[in-house]
Amino acid sequence: MDRVLIFLIFNLITIGVIAQNESDIIKIGDQLPSFKLESSKGVINSRDLKGKVVLINFFATWCPSCVKELPHIEQKVWKKYKSNPDFKLLVVGREHTEKELSSFSKEKYTMPFYPDEGRKVYQLFAHNTIPRCYVVDKKGVVVYALTGFSEESFKEMLDVVEDLID
């Protein structure tokens, strides 16, 4: 856990990779807000996520950066951690219905997608801009936040997830 803290502080102070601004509502160090996501796979309640490392991704099917990021999440996160009881992945389609997400993902992805048709969950985290990823530790604290997509920042996020799970 100390490696994660040192890593986060270094990024925040030295290179500013984890940029947070006025469009952010949830910031690093904040508790995960209370929310509920519903899909045909069941209901996810944020209070049930304590004790797990959680990666939350907000995306839209029409967003080029989001579409570029999703295969990385599938291959490098979902396939690696899907069977780990200490991990939960939430891929949330901002302003999408379950039918739209099912049509979009059915032949490309095995990871679960959750609709957020009215931005009810997204609006708890930010005002605008996708893709967005948040890593939440087992105590329910946001320890990493990423807006946009780049190979380098995605790798840094993976390192944080790996350190929290180990």
Image (cartoon, helix red, strand yellow):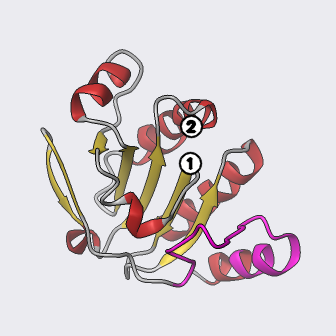
State whether the magenta stretch is mostly helix, strand or loop: loop
Q: Position of residue 48 (x, y in %)?
A: 20, 70
Label 1 close to label 2 by CB (< 8 Å): yes
At numbered mark 2, what does the secondary structure look like: helix, strand or loop? helix
Residue 86 falls in image quadrant: bottom left
Q: Is 88 situated left or right of 24 in this image?
A: left
Q: Position of residue 61 (x, y in %)?
A: 46, 30
Which residue is label 2 attached to?
66
Toward the right, the furthest residue is 14
Residue 10 visible to the viewer: yes
Q: Is 157 situated left or right of 124 in this image?
A: right
Alpha-carbon distance for marks 1 and 2?
7 Å
90 relative to 146, above or below: above
Residue 166 visible to the viewer: no
102 relative to 107, above or below: below
Q: What residue appears at the point 46 percent right and 37 percent down from the top-left corner?
A: 60
Q: Residues within 10 Å of mark 1 (few under 14, many from 20)?
A: many
Three-letter residue code for mark 1: Ile
Q: Is 161 situated left or right of 89 in this image?
A: right
Which residues fall within the magenta stretch? 8-29
Q: Is 121 situated left or right of 164 in this image?
A: left
Is residue 18 magenta-colored?
Answer: yes
Which residue is label 1 attached to?
130
Q: What residue appears at the point 52 percent right and 35 percent down from the top-left corner?
A: 70
Q: What residue appears at the point 81 percent right and 70 percent down from the top-left corner?
A: 16
In this view of the protein, which residue sits in the foreground, 32 or 86?
A: 32
Three-letter residue code for mark 2: Cys
